[in-house]
Image (cartoon, rainbow, N blue to C red):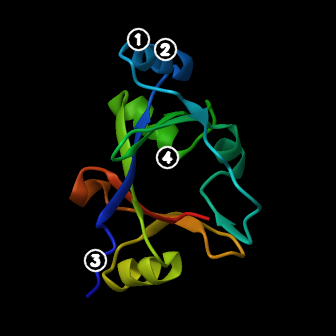
Amino acid sequence: MKQFFKTLHHVCIVVHDLDKTVNYYEKLGVGPWFDYPKAGPYVEFDVPNRAASDAMRYKCVDLDNVQIQICQPSELDSPQRRFLDQHGEGVYHLGFEVADRDAAEAAARALGIGVTARGARADGSGFAYFDTRAQAGVVLEVRKSA
């Protein structure tokens, strides 16, 4: 079986105050930060709450070896909001880059791993979040960059 949780792309941290958190990291010399690039339209987009997904705020920084994403969910119901309310701030998911998002999603499903959210673009890029918190301690994601 091919490993699809092999190339770490990013760590996503859920926080109450995006600006405050980014400012703190900048004081530590971590930056520059940029808005999460929500690239082109999805041909498939299956998330628990579209309005909540659209309202989330993200900032990212590319380090030498990995990207950090800071996420501030809105007050609307979403998995990130529930995580923040139940556990406080912390690592919500690990994102892994894959060559083929569809194949990685299918392989995870074949292992009995549930998909909690997914999106695909016409160019083959996109993402899939898996229901792995109880077993892995965090949500795992696969993504194919454009």
Q: Is residue 102 left or right of residue 94?
A: right
Q: Amino acid at mark 4?
A: Pro
Label ID, residue 27: 1
Query: Quick one: label 3, few (<14), some, or many (20+) residues within 10 Å?
Result: few
Viewer-nearest of discs 1 and 4: 1
* The quadrant where residue 39 appears: bottom right
Q: Secondary structure at mark 3?
A: loop
Q: Nearer the viewer, residue 128 or 8?
A: 8
Q: CA distance from mark 3 to mark 2?
A: 36 Å
Q: Amino acid at mark 1?
A: Lys
Q: Which of marks 2 and 3 precedes in the sequence?
A: 3
Q: Eyeballing the image, is 32 above or below 43?
A: above
Q: Amino acid at mark 2?
A: Asn
Residue at 52 percent of width and 27 percent of height: 32
Q: Are marks 1 and 4 in contact (CB under 8 Å)?
A: no
Quarter of the image with the N terminus is bottom left
Label ID, residue 3: 3
* The quadrant where residue 56 appears: top right
Q: Which of marks 2 and 4 precedes in the sequence?
A: 2
Q: Is residue 129 left or right of residue 139?
A: right
Q: CA distance from mark 1 to mark 3?
A: 37 Å
Query: Quick one: label 2, few (<14), some, or many (20+) residues within 10 Å?
Result: some
Q: CA distance from mark 3 to mark 4?
A: 26 Å
Q: Nearer the viewer, residue 32 or 57?
A: 32
Residue at 39 percent of width and 18 percent of height: 29
Q: Which of marks 4 and 3 precedes in the sequence?
A: 3
Q: Amino acid at mark 3?
A: Gln
Label ID, residue 79: 4
Q: Which of marks 4 and 1 precedes in the sequence?
A: 1
Q: Which residue is mark 2?
A: 23
